[in-house]
Image (cartoon, rainbow, N blue to C red):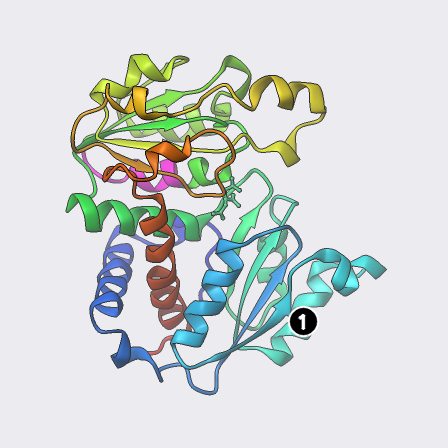
Amino acid sequence: MKHLMSPLDLSVEELDRLLDLANDIEAHPSRYSHSCEGKKLATLFYEPSTRTRLSFEAAMLNLGGSVLGFSSADSSSAAKGESVSDTIRIISCYADICAMRHPKEGAPLVASMKSSIPVINAGDGGHQHPTQTLTDLLTIRSLKGRLGGFTIGLCGDLKFGRTVHSLIQALVRYPNVRFVLISPEELRLPDNVRDGVLKKSHQEFREEVRLEDAIPELDLLYMTRVQKERFFNEEDYIRMKDFYILDAEKMKLASEDMLVLHPLPRVNEISTEVDDDPRAVYFKQAQYGVYVRMALILTLLGIEV
Ligand code: NCD
């Protein structure tokens, strides 16, 4: 049985197959509409979510399966002190597969060790968010036609942003990816990702503070929200929160085919005036998230259509 804790749990070949399947689902959704009949997905969300939880649920419903779960720790027995290890043993009796989001790094991994059903990490603290990465890769491959051979700017909260950590891990495996890490000093990429992943991979990267300095050379701009919930004090958050605002003026500096991605939710870091720019693909990206989660559920359940 396979779990998904990090994007590296899938080889590049497995990832390719998964993205191919997601594209096939996009092209022929009705072929898949009964493939999970009788199967149940549990969504165990100990942290807020809109897209990840609902796209998982939509994915399972699109496959003809059913869903159950909880959307906050307060409404589960975690509020009574139950451990994730105990909870997952119980959920294993109720469902065939589960997606778990937790504020503690490693909690889904702990759960997977006690689970008799596949566990998907739907975001663990500031650590990893592999299904957002699958979404990002599908978006990039579908809209750019390839993975690799591009310059990507990652902008915003690179310290706490788990989507960035997972995306970097996944992208270093493709040829000729140049990374421009755009963040304030305080929110730079943690050493374990910069040294442990980027430096080790021998991909080219550099750090910038000003978005304007980096934007002209980018093929992809991945914007992120300052992760309010991971700050120790409100003052620091307030100081950082509007550090970057991508607006129509800055978009003029970008190339005509640079794509703007964002895992969402957006706060202030992308002005709504950018939404109508054809290069802004973050809402499309959310749609790709459903196809890729459908493909992931099928793959982890070993269902072939
Ligand atoms: C991201 C997350 O939860 O890490 N959201 C998402 O799943 N699309 C990004 C964020 O919350 O900023």
Q: Residue at x 54, y 49 (%)?
A: 123
Q: Residue at x 25, y 66 (%)?
A: 26
User: Can see residue 220?
Assistant: yes
Answer few, some or many: residues within 10 Å of disc 1's Cα (few below 14, many 20 plus, some between 14 and 19). Answer: some
User: Can see residue 146?
Assistant: no
| Image coordinates for residue 296, horizontal then vertical, percent | 38, 64
Query: Is the CB of mark 1 within 8 Å of ligand 1?
Result: no
| Image coordinates for residue 80, horizontal then vertical, percent | 84, 61
Quadrant hosting residue 23 = bottom left
Q: In this view, does 292 lie to the left or right of 65?
A: left
Amino acid on which the number 1 mark rests in the picture: Arg
| Above or below, comparing residue 11 to residue 82 in the picture | above
Q: Which residue is drawn at 39% across and 75% down?
A: 62
Q: Is residue 278 left or right of residue 210?
A: left
| Image coordinates for residue 47, horizontal then vertical, percent | 64, 50
Does the stretch in magenta take in 93? Answer: no
Q: The residue tagged with tag 1: helix, strand or loop?
A: helix
Identify the residue position indicated by label 1 in the image.
89
Q: Give the range drawn in magenta.
A: 167-175
| Above or below, comparing residue 59 to residue 282 in the picture | below
Q: Say how many tags the image has.
A: 1
Does the stretch in magenta take in 170? Answer: yes
| Image coordinates for residue 291, horizontal then vertical, percent | 33, 63
| Above or below, comparing residue 97 to residue 256 in the picture | below
